[in-house]
Image (tube, rainbow, N blue to C red):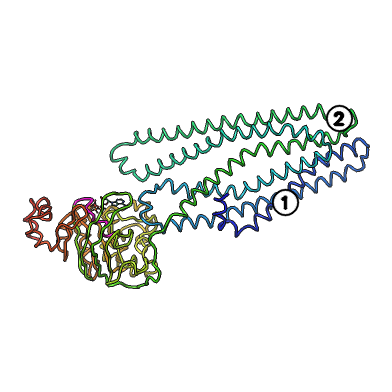
Amino acid sequence: MDTFKRLKEFYWPYKRYFFISILLLLLVTGFTVIYPIILQVTIDHIVLDQQYHLVPYVSLGFLLITALKGVAVYYHQFLGELFGIRSVYELRNALYRKLQFLPFRYYDNARTGDLMSRLTADVEGFRFFLSAGFAQLINLVMLVGLSLGIMFYFSPSLAFLTLGAMPFLVITVYRFDKKVHPAFRNIRKSLANMNTKVQENISGMNTVKSLSKEDFEIGRFDEKNSDYKDKFIYTSSIWAKFFPVMELIGNICVVVLLGYGGWLVINGQITPGVLGAFFSLVWYIIGPLMGLGFIVNMFSQSKASGERLLQVLDEEEDIFDNDGAIEVERLEGHVQFNNVSHRYDSEDELALKNITFDAPPGKTIGLIGATGSGKTSITQLISRFYEPNRGEILIDGHPLTDYTLKSVRHNIGVVLQESFLFSSSIKDNISYGSPEVSMDRIIDAAKRAQAHDFIMDLPNGYDTILGERGMGLSGGQKQRIAIARAICIDPSILILDDATSAVDMETEGKIQAAFKEVMKGRTTFIIAHRISSLMHADEIIVLDNGEIVERGKHEELLKNNGHYQHIYEIQFKDRKSFLQEA
Ligand SMILES: Nc1ncnc2c1ncn2[C@@H]1O[C@H](COP(=O)(O)OP(=O)(O)OP(=O)(O)O)[C@@H](O)[C@H]1O
């Protein structure tokens, strides 16, 4: 119950829908148990007493009750659904909001498929119980309780006999539930696995196709699909047994009832009408009990879903605005690292060790080093995606944590090796970081990013809708849209993380020209493997294994006989003449 209590803030504001719906359910149950009473009256007082002139009245009464019951059922169901859907509307928004603010640390280990299924299947599981589960539980208690009450009123001995069948029914339900519950859980797990497989396959379609692994992928999917099919068939076979068994027990109960009840009628201890009413009432007990397994199952599934949702909601947002953090419209862009060390949670080794540098406003810093040497980690600390374990990061002379996250991130433009484009228009992609900018500024940014000409060649120009992940554009074109996006927010700090490594030399030339334009007046960090991308930087920092091993200008570093010179030799051995011309 703790799970439901902790999620109360989402459904309690809508409690009025729930309570009205339950009130109407009381009416529905009341109307339902009136039927057998009408039956008893009809048999005993109209048929046996030959009062046939009462038939129209009873029929009208019966019709009226049916109509009233119909109206009550409608509102009960509608309000129940309203209660569920309104509650999970808030819940879904809260989860999505949480996902936006969870730190990168969380996403390092999260699986997309799993998160997707929490936001969809688990929310739905929880809603289902709110909408129908609670009500069914209450309905069960009321219908069984009222039916038994009427039975005892009519004939205690016959009611006791009916009660005698209950343990068999309950044991069957219990045994069934023990089997079917894990079977359902396995179906859910298998479905989640299959979804993850499909999602991964679509995301990695490039790799699949380029390595001709289509058949291999079809085989792997078939495994998951077969697993789902087998689990489903197994569960269906349990389900298929349940209803006949329950019906058999019910019918045995009815036969015994008929035998003993008939004997009571013959002896004049009960009327034939009472026996008729008992036949209806006994199914009002067996019916809900048959559904008990389903309700218990639904309850435990919904509890499990609620727990999975709480896991996301309870996740710590460890990077947030400190008390009194200042909001700054525009930073100067002076970045300083003082003895900064950083280790990722999942790693034993430090990713950065005692990093110190000073990047004055408007200067360009080049970061170079082998893969895994810590280049990206430095820029991720500047954006405050992670907090360093030791040392101090200052922006414009103040600790990074003195500013609001928005102030910092609004002032940093990032262009990655593979920038993400949304499946919306080019215009919206460019203005994503600053949606309020005018069309003129969007066009200006695109021109400066050398993207305007190719955008105008597209069928709908700036209104062209991109496919998922920017499909339909070349790597270089996507990159230039990402540069335009960075220009649009007019950042004081610019991070270019391996931004030209995925394009050919000609496109690199165009992108470099775009960068020159963007970098003017901004503190820029260029991460690159190619020396040509950062040789003009004001300071080049050479990293190795998380440490700064060399620093200086291109010409100075070439004389050091160290790492940088070594990289240079490898990259430029055959192109020295070309460089001299440049
Ligand atoms: N999110 C993360 N979680 C755990 N470890 C990480 C994470 N990101 C980076 N690392 C580790 O930190 C170290 C530095 O990685 P980083 O990405 O900063 O290197 P890099 O120089 O930018 O590499 P590359 O040139 O390949 O992009 C590596 O050992 C890497 O495995």
Q: Residue at x 84, y 44 (%)?
A: 59
Q: Quadrant of the C terminus?
A: bottom left
In terms of depth relative to the viewer, which is nearer, 149 or 504?
149
Q: CA distance from mark 2 to mark 1?
A: 37 Å
Q: In the image, is residue 454 part of the stretch drawn in magenta?
A: no
Residue at the image point whose x is 36% and y is 64% from the top: 433
Number of numbered discs: 2
Q: Amino acid at mark 2?
A: Leu
Residue 519 placement, left or right of 59: left
The location of residue 336, given as percent across then percent down, is 24, 67
Which structural element holds mark 1?
helix
Residue sitting at x 60%, y 32%: 175
Judged by depth in the image, the label closer to the viewer, 2 or 1, is 2
Measured as percent of width and height from the top left, residue 22 is found at 69, 52
Residue 98 x, y percent position in the rendering:
45, 57
Classify residue 342 by image quadrant: bottom left
Q: Secondary structure at mark 2?
A: helix
Q: Quick check: can you spot residue 439?
A: no
The residue under label 2 is: 264
Q: Which residue range is magenta in the image? A: 370-379
The reply to whether dot 2 and dot 1 touch (C-beta < 8 Å) is no
Mark carried by residue 72: 1
Residue 523 picture location, percent across and down: 24, 67
